[in-house]
Image: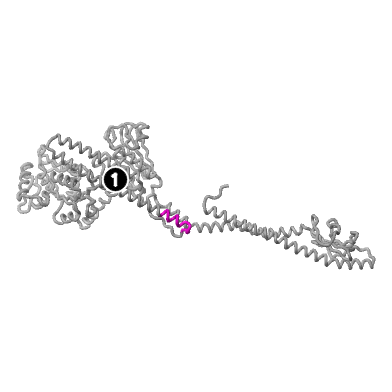
Amino acid sequence: MRILLVEDDTILGAAVRDHITAEGHSADWVGRLDRAGEHLDAAPYDLILLDLMLPDGRGIPFLRALRRRGDVTPVIILTALDQISDRIEGLNAGADDYLTKPFDLAELSARLAAVARRYSGNPNPLVGLGELQVDLAARTVIRDGRRVDLTAREWALFEAFVQRPGQVISKTQLEDRLYAFGSEVESNAIEVHVSRLRKKLGAGAVETVRGVGYRLGDRR
Amino acid sequence: MRGPASLQGRLSLWLTLGAVLLWAVAAAWTAVHLRHEMDEVFDSALEEAAQRLLPLAVRDIIAREKDDSPDQGVATLREHDEYFTYVVRDAEGQVLLRSHRADLGVFPPFSGMGFADTATHRVYSDAALRGTITISVAEPLAHRWDVAREALIGLALPLTLIVPASLFGVWAAVRAAMAPIRRFRAGIEARGGGDLSPIPAEGLPSELQPNARAVNLLLDRLRRALEAERSFTANSAHELRTPVAGALAQVQRLIVEAPDEDTRSRARQVEAALQRLARLSEKLMQLARAEGGRLQAEAPVDLAPILRMLVADMGRGDGHRIELTLPDAGVRASIDPDAFAILARNLIENALHHDAQDAPVQVSLSPKGVLRVVNTGPVVPADVLGRLARPFERGPTDAHGSGLGLAIVAAIAAGTGGRLDLISPATGRADGFEARFSMSRAEMR
């Protein structure tokens, strides 16, 4: 997923960015709301991690403005405000989840995945695809009873297909999802990852739709 | 005798007593004065009668001596009630003439002209022909007393009407004057414990305006102090949580990225210490909040959704071990929602921590505002139960907690006038532990 992280604390921000990047997501990290707005205008995001107390304002009005504009990007609030009234205010403003600091990075991952699953329309983390059994929560793929090890990038790519079964995803969309602003993207990076996925999961796991992009292989 | 406690009662009583007393004094003074005037009128009538009668009597007697007739009486036209009786006597005291009802016993011997009093009568005497003929006119004193009594009754009669009428009038007037004070009092009583907005003091008597101002100033100071305290707690929470969150996240990254097991295990120790620090600081801030006040909401809130959200949130980390029972209708109470959430969270955390078999923890909220949290486990001895709500006091358990959870709950219960009961074994069971928080009646609206 391509995630926008809005957090002004550099130590926490860096750790969260490293963590979600290590899980195969692409992360853009900003410390101010105005920068967050610019990023949202410039690129599509799959999820926003939003701190509530930022140097140039509070996160709740920002979130309300976002929802008023009709933006439905999932938002998880990360905040030090732990009162139930803050939580209710946050959720009422349009947040999908609420995580109070300090939190476990593992819990953050679980919530990211849960929110992503809800948005994909199937909250069940277990997806069966022919000979493949995918557990979106545990981030595992079982092929013919044996676990297949995927790198973070490969998993992120595969998850994108699993979450949008039947949809064609363009190469640019996949690059956005996998790489943050400013990172070096080799021109054939997506092709390389797709071919590795096919090698590990079977040649039919990912189909190429010529000239448009890729989609989950039809294995029925 | 104890007087009435209320200002209204006291004013009514004393004003009525005062009015009655004044009336009584005025009536007494009038009666005395009247009596004096009456005496003058009666005396002059007595004197007038004597002086009118005497020449007639003298002429009559002289005429009689010429005729030498022995008639001593005066022919009377008819029998009638006499107020005045008289006798005419000669120098030896021989009765020459008397009114037909005159009782000779009441007339003292002639001792000179003028007024004289006997035990029963007022007598006026006069003399003619150089004292050879005297007249005494007597009037019974009882007659004068009768007149005086009638006058007095006439004056006192209104009193029997005036006492109840003035009592009612004074009461009504005082009550009307007290109306703004009653409104002010009702204004204080009507608000919940958390409502610290100024109380309207329009129409309050000027004597009480300073009091109303003082009350409102006090409320304002209290509100500002509580708000400052609240924002301080919230800010310290933020200031404390963010660095801990950063350190925790970094050390968790370190655990993943560490090249060798030794570094990883050290990083895990730092992680554990940080987590303990995070828990402890959270509990200390909760305790500060619980003991600080502002535990009541400005307006009643429905507690059911709060509990639902809390349980959903807590259940995520701990499997689905929480069984929640909520009444169909909402449970509205004027407890501060954050304080209630802290209280419920601590009770549930406590139950999850100390549950012996990792069995489901039962959480229920009754329509009357009783929150019950029940977990399984061995019976907690009574003497331990009594100590559990003290800070840093733990039951016989291996579970590591902050030891502050129940102290926080107890502080919130005390601050909201609610009741915390720790019961073991749980109600209707042979084992287990039950924590029961009953909201005060005033909280339930």
Q: Provide residue B391's location: percent of width, then percent of height.
A: 33, 38
Q: Residues within 10 Å of mark 1 (few under 14, many from 20)?
A: some
Q: Which residue is drawn at 88% across and 61% down?
A: B89
What is the secondary structure assignment of the residue under circle 1?
helix
Q: Residue at x 79, y 56 (%)?
A: B120
Query: In the shown orientation, is residue B338 left or right of residue B20?
Result: left
- Between residues B37 and A41, which one lies in front from this camera angle? B37
Q: Quadrant of residue B169?
A: bottom right
Q: Nearer the viewer, residue A11 or B165?
A: A11
What chain is tagged by disc 1?
B
Eyeballing the image, is B165 above or below A49? below
Q: Position of residue B79 (x, y in %)?
A: 83, 62
Magenta highlight on residue A100? no
Q: Which of A148 and B106 is in front in this view?
A: B106
**Horizontal relation, residue A89 to residue A13: left or right:** right
Whether B31 is drawn above or below B268: the answer is: below
- Range covered by the magenta-colored residues: B204-216
Q: Name the residue under label 1.
A: B308
Residue at the image point whose x is 39% and y is 49% from the top = B193
Q: Is any atom of residue B368 visible in this view?
A: no
